[in-house]
Structures are given as structure tokens and as C-alpha cells.
Amino acid sequence: MTHRVSALISAFGFLASVMLLVLAVREYRSGASVLWLVTGAVIFLSASYTLVRDVRRLRTGPTA
């Protein structure tokens, strides 16, 4: 059950990171610093990695 909750939280974090990345791209295109884009990309990649890790853990099933 804990792994399911963790995967659900990771999925919501992934969705939030996608929205943040879209916001960062919009801000960068309107003349903001490139740090917006870099920060959005780093957060997106981190959330993606966490989601993949949690889904893999969920698919392997319970360990002993």
C-alpha cells in the first residue's frame, strides 16, 4: 500500500512539474532569465526520474 501512495504522490509531482516547465518556457519566451528554463527542466527531470522509480518499484511487487 505504501508503494501505491508513493507512486500517486509522484504522479501528482510529475503533473506539477509539467505545469512548471510550461510556465518556465512562457516566461523565458517573454524575456525572463534563462534560469527559469533551467530550473523548470531540472525539476521536470527530477520528477520524471522519481515517477519512473516508483512505478518500477510498484511493478516488481512486494519484496519479502
Image (cartoon, grey):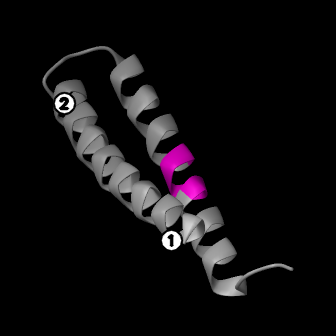
Quick check: 56 left or right of 12? right
Vertical order, 18 against 55 (above or below): above
Q: Which mark is residue 53?
A: none
Q: Amino acid at mark 1?
A: Arg
**Crowd tier of the residue under label 1, counting other residues whose Cα lies within 10 Å: few below 14, some 14–19, many 20 or above:** few
Secondary structure beneath dot 2 equals helix
**37 lies above or below 59:** above
Q: Which label was assigned to residue 29?
A: 2
Q: What residue is shown at x 17% (from left), y 34% (from top)? A: 26
Residue 14: percent from the left, percent from the top? 39, 54
Q: Which residue is denoted by mark 1 in the rendering? A: 4
Q: Quadrant of residue 35?
A: top left
Nearest-to-viewer mark from 1 and 2: 1
> Horizontal and vertical percent for residue 57?
68, 73
Residue 56 highlighted magenta (yes or no): no
Q: Along the polypeptide, which appears first: circle 1 or circle 2? A: 1
On the rendered image, what quadrant is the N terminus found in?
A: bottom right
x, y percent for residue 28? 24, 26
Q: Is residue 6 above or below residue 57?
A: above
Residue at point 18%, 26% (across, down): 27
Region rendered in magenta: 46-50
Label 2 sits on what residue type? Answer: Arg
